[in-house]
Image (cartoon, rainbow, N blue to C red):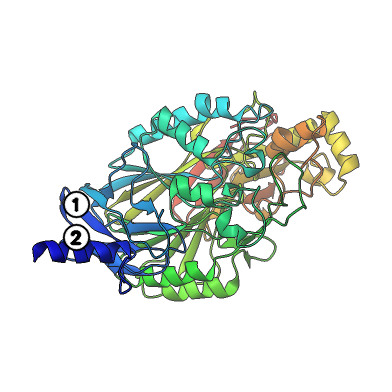
Amino acid sequence: MKRIILLISALLCTGLLSTAKTTIKGKVTLDGKPAAGVLVSDGTQIVKTDRKGRYAMDSDKKDSVVFITTPSGTVAVAEDGLRPTFWSLLTKAPRKCERHDFKLVSENQDEYTVLFLPDVHLSNDPRRDDIRRFKEMVFPFIQKQAESGKGPVYAFNLGDLTHEVYWYEMNFKEDDAYRMLRDLGLKAKVYSVTGNHDHDGAIVGENVDFRSAWLYRKTWGPDRYSVNIGKDHWIFLDNIIYINVEGQGKKAPGINGDRSYRDEFTSAQMAWLEKDLSYVPDDANVYICTHCPFFASGKTDKELVPAEQLAKIDALCSRFQHTALNFAGHIHKFDFMDMSAYPHLFQYGLPCASGIMWETPIEADLYCSDGCDAGIMVASCTKGEMDMHYQTYAHGEKYLRVYDMNGVAKAYRESEGVKMQRELAPTRMDYSAPEFENCIFVNYWGWKPGETVEMIENGKMLKVKNVRHEDPVKNFAYDLPHILSPVKHHSVRPKDACNHMFEAKAATATSEVKIIVRDKEGRVLHLEILQRPKAFGLGME
């Protein structure tokens, strides 16, 4: 009798009996014992493991991945030392049953550390020399942050780890970047989201968004999932819909389309998110990682993701006691902001970990599109509280740069590159103009809504304006080198607005100016003393 029961069970699993309802099944263990109540998903439905750690579902396998939501206080085993194996690729035909087991181990997550890695843009391009620069400068810095982090350390790859336009030309793809991180021995567990450059530009036609992400899925897993760490619920979503119109765009080896995309969630992503959040308690912190930020600041703040989708996410997060935070890259600059239409969401838009995609001169420091010093954001999380600090590669923890614009004006007047730039792009900022005489600029890239910047000259408070001027260091470190080289892309574009630039006009050219940054409660966050006159230079403090 026992043998008959086993035979029937086997036939059901293999789909040989027409009444089969299970296409994916398996078991989840914690420290070698059955783990009950663990959420398992195929990207559409979510089921729970039973008291013996078993799960089963009738899946169409449309997303080709099955994964678990790791419970708080646990982590999925990382067999390669880098990727927690909370997911598994589905390899059998849709109606064939396949088994996928998951192993969890206990982990003390009372405190933990997150390293945010947006837009690393590894390409193996000799012109950028990015692989050597990453290995010799950036990776040792990241490793040092991992080694000094409190508790378990996680690295969150926020998309564009590589750059698809160079996949075939430079023979360096998503899985090559993964192997490099693994072989370098990164001391952090990596979770990822899909960026626009993580798609295969060789693939065009029907269902291109899903099909072009094949290598990402093979390397990093599902395009939607969640992880509970300590008191926090982390959600990882793909808000890039790859279009890649055939026959258009930049002609590059192996690339068959224009690599176009929309900053948008699919309906499947939104449906899964609603189900996922239904399991999250009201008092949890909800953090949503995406490649593209939710919002964009400018003369008029606007949505980057469709308004109706943001309204839905805001409504889903309205029951939580704490504001849901969005962590994203893509914009290559800082953009901390919210919008009144979405009161339950706040965005941390983060700059490029590669500076501006390794496009600054090889011998120079790395800077981002808003002029900030390149680095990574580090979050220390302790029992539901998060403390974030920005660590730059060249100067350690740093949030602002102060300019004596008289020194900047001199550099602009003497630069042959600026003269050429003025001819090619007359709308660019001319900081040698009389209107900037005796001005002080503060690029405070750590700015958040409600914070203020004060400037004091000889005991007198100066009038400070939040302006949207381009950063002069960014111009000299990125745009002007392209003006003076055969590669002129980006060099004559309209200025990159910097929403966290603050300007005041001093009475004299030589007086000392004190800069005070306060939070919305009036507490001092940063204090800088500008001794004038001060020359302008890259890497200036």
x, y (%) of residue 63? 46, 61
Which residue does the image show at 33% across and 73% down from the upper left?
18
Q: Is residue 14 above or below residue 110?
A: below
Query: Among all residues in the image, which is located at the extreme right?
Result: 423
Above or below, 65 against 481 in this view is: below
Disc nearest the viewer among 2 and 1:
2
Q: In which quarter of the image is the C terminus?
A: top right
Q: For this view, does 433 lie left or right of residue 460?
A: right
Dot 2 alpha-carbon crowd within 10 angstroms: few under 14, some 14 to 19, many 20 or more: many
Dot 2 or dot 1, earlier in sequence: 1
Examine the rendered structure and indicate whether residue 241 appears above or below residue 498: below
Residue displayed at 88% across by 35% down: 420
Q: Residue at x 45, y 76 (%)?
A: 315
Q: Mark 1 points at which residue?
A: 30
Q: Which residue is drawn at 45% across and 70% down?
A: 344
Residue 341 seen in this snapshot: no
Label 1 sits on what residue type? Leu
Distance from Cα at disc 2 to Cα at disc 1: 9 Å
Q: Nearer the viewer, residue 304 or 527?
A: 304
* Whole-percent x, y for residue 245 in the image: 72, 57
Mark count: 2
Q: Badge 2 is on which residue?
A: 53
Q: What residue type is labelled 2?
A: Gly
Q: What element carries label 2?
A: loop
Q: Is mark 1 on a helix, strand or loop?
A: strand
Q: Nearer the viewer, residue 54 or 187?
A: 54
- Answer with the quarter of the image where residue 295 lies: bottom right
State the residue in front, 441 or 132. Answer: 132
Give yes or no for contact between labels 2 and 1 (Cβ–Cβ under 8 Å). yes
- The residue closer to the viewer here, 145 or 509, is 145
Q: Is residue 247 visible?
A: yes
Provide residue 361's location: percent of width, then percent of height.
Answer: 68, 28
